[in-house]
Image: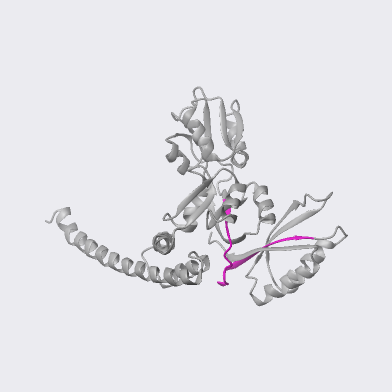
Amino acid sequence: MATEDQRLAPLRAQIDALDIKLLELMSKRARTAQEIGHIKGEAASPVFRPERELQVIANLLQSNQGPLHAEGITAIWREIMSACRALEAKQTIAYLGPRGTFSEQAAEAAFGSSIEGLACNSLDEVFKAVEKGAAQFGVVPVENSSEGAISRTLDLLLDSPLQISGEVVLPIRHHLLTKTGLLAGVTTVCAHAQALAQCQQWLTAHTPNLKRQAVSSNAEAARMAALDPTLAAIAGDPAQIAYGLQVNAGHIQDDAHNRTRFVIIGRHTCQATGHDQTSLVLSVDNQAGAVYRLLAPLAQHGVSMTRFESRPARKGTWEYHFYIDIAGHAEDAQVALALSDLQALAAFYKMLGSYPRATV
């Protein structure tokens, strides 16, 4: 009877031969990407076009006959496109740092790992880096499924000349981390304010005697905990690995389906893909029924509103800006009609972008 190695040998030889063919094909693809890069360079066109990359993956998924799952194909081709894009031109992506944040994870989910990451100390710095050209794109959190909108991001989107070019939705899994994995000697748990809020029920039940300290990011909390044995941090897998911490308790978020939505900010205007979303900021005069009248065009033209968020306008008493997401692209016929009517009715109107929706 043949041994396991004898039975595996021809299959391994077949795998090796297929890998060589795959490498040849990927090299051919990379050379084609370089030619595309030359053409884009002459036209000063953007290297990253999220709508095009979404189309590439959608075509592959439609042609897929298995056994690879859709998630696997998406992950593989995201990295292939990232590596080929890097041959066209260097791509610097700004995100809220330091290393190990969910924002860094979202940046790699959107752009792949063949990027130059620019870790910023605040959301304001992410916007500034893109506005000043230090980065081609930025990735910022805009809302969490448990705690709602990230207010600072909304304010910055209102004031910035940048627009939204895409979105990423990440499942958020929080762990309680310490240097040793134990809580002996720990007096304080640190995390971003959003993470503390997302874990408050668990913290109250399991660590009622620990003080809670809000810091700029979960990764910063992990960095601090790596240096100070009196601190525990709430953070995810990337921060745990980056700072060499141990898990005291895993998956401590109160909502098992906790997710955060990130948006890609830049100067790129996306073309329609058929799977798009448009984000707006509106305000109305302080009159009875004004908001109802403002939103009427959406119903009249059959456009679905997927998100509605209000923020103080910071320019008068009880005045608000409304952040609205609607299904469809600004170039879609019915959406274009609705937007025209909205602009005529609104006291303030700003379109933040039309862009491909994330596949959740």
Task: Give how far across and how far down residue 157 sits, in percent.
Answer: 66, 55
Task: Give how far across and how far down residue 90 sits, in percent.
Answer: 44, 58
Q: What residue is at 45 percent from the left and 52 percent from the top?
A: 116
Q: What residue is at 46 percent from the left and 68 percent from the top?
A: 41
Does any portion of residue 252 appear in the rendered image? no
Q: Residue furthest top?
A: 185
Task: Give how far across and how far down residue 207 sits, in percent.
Answer: 57, 29
Q: Is residue 66 above or below residue 148?
A: below
Task: Give how far across and how far down residue 213 sits, in percent.
Answer: 61, 32
Q: Residue furthest left?
A: 1
Q: Residue furthest right?
A: 288
Q: Residue furthest front?
A: 42
The residue nearer to you, when weighing 143 against 9, is 143
The residue nearer to you, when weighing 132 against 195, is 132
In terms of image quadrants, where is residue 284?
A: bottom right
Number of numbered discs visible in the structure rendering? 0
Relative to 202, 158 lies left or right: right
Q: What residue is at 19 percent from the left and 61 percent from the top?
A: 13
Q: What residue is at 76 percent from the left and 56 percent from the top?
A: 321
Q: Is residue 93 above or below residue 336?
A: above
Does any portion of residue 353 appear in the rendered image? yes
Residue 268 lies in the magenta-colored region? yes
Locate the N terminus by quadrant: bottom left
Residues in magenta? 260-283
The residue nearer to you, when weighing 98 against 92, is 92
Residue 110 lies in the magenta-colored region? no
